[in-house]
Structures are given as C-alpha cells and as structure tokens.
Image (spheres, grey):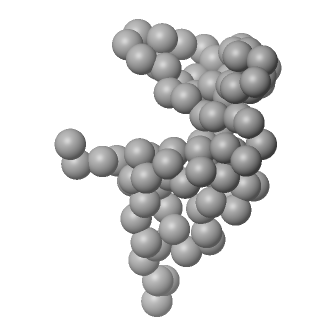
C-alpha cells in the first residue's frame, strides 16, 4: 500500500524557500496578473543586493517550483505541493 504524501501549500513552500535564500541575498517571487501564465513561468528569482532578476525571466531559465524546492532541501520526499484552499 502506497503511503499518502504530506501536503504543503505553494504559499508555505515559498516561505520555506525564501527563509533559506535570505542568507544568500536572494528571494523567489511570484508574478502577478496575466504575467503569471506567460512562457517564462510564474516564478522568478531576484538577487536582492543588485536588485536584478537572475532566473525565471525567460523560457530558457524557467523555475520548476518542486524541483527547485527539492534541490534546496525545503521539500522532503514525503511531501507534495497542493493547491491552497483560499
């Protein structure tokens, strides 16, 4: 029998990611409005010191939230991203 994975909302995961990135001077942001669904994806990474976008600005460096979170260690194998109930 397969074990159900623990749910983590996108909002909670973004908070985890940004706590981890803060020490590196970076922050992950979510695009608003119609920009959220453009070809480059809904997320972009900002270098706070230089105030510049360092990833997520084009289709070539699109950010996959789940892969990014797992690579950072902010989303465990037993967890999965779920839609928020707002």
Q: Residue at x 63, y 18 (%)?
A: 40
Indicate the position of residue 80 as horizontal and vertical percent values.
49, 61
Q: Is residue 12 above or below residue 46?
A: below
Q: Is residue 1 above or below residue 9?
A: below
Question: Residue pushed farthest bottom?
Answer: 1
Q: Residue at x 34, y 47 (%)?
A: 83
Indicate the position of residue 47 as horizontal and vertical percent values.
74, 26
Q: Is residue 2 above or below residue 43?
A: below
Q: Residue at x 62, y 60 (%)?
A: 74
Q: Is residue 62 above or below residue 25?
A: above
Nearer to us in this view, 6 or 30: 30
Quarter of the image with the C terminus is: top left
Indicate the position of residue 81 as horizontal and vertical percent values.
46, 55
Question: Is 25 positioned to the left or the right of 19 in the image?
Answer: right
Nearer to us in this view, 86 or 50: 50
Which image quadrant for residue 26?
top right
């Amino acid at each position: 029998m397969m074990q159900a994975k623990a749910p983590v909302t996108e909002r909670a995961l973004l908070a985890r990611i940004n706590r981890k990135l803060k020490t590196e001077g970076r922050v992950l942001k979510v695009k608003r409005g119609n920009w959220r669904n453009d070809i480059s994806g809904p997320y972009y990474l900002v270098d706070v010191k230089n105030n510049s976008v360092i990833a997520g600005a084009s289709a070539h460096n699109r950010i996959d939230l789940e892969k990014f979170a797992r690579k950072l260690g902010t989303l465990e194998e037993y967890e999965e991203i779920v839609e928020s109930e707002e």
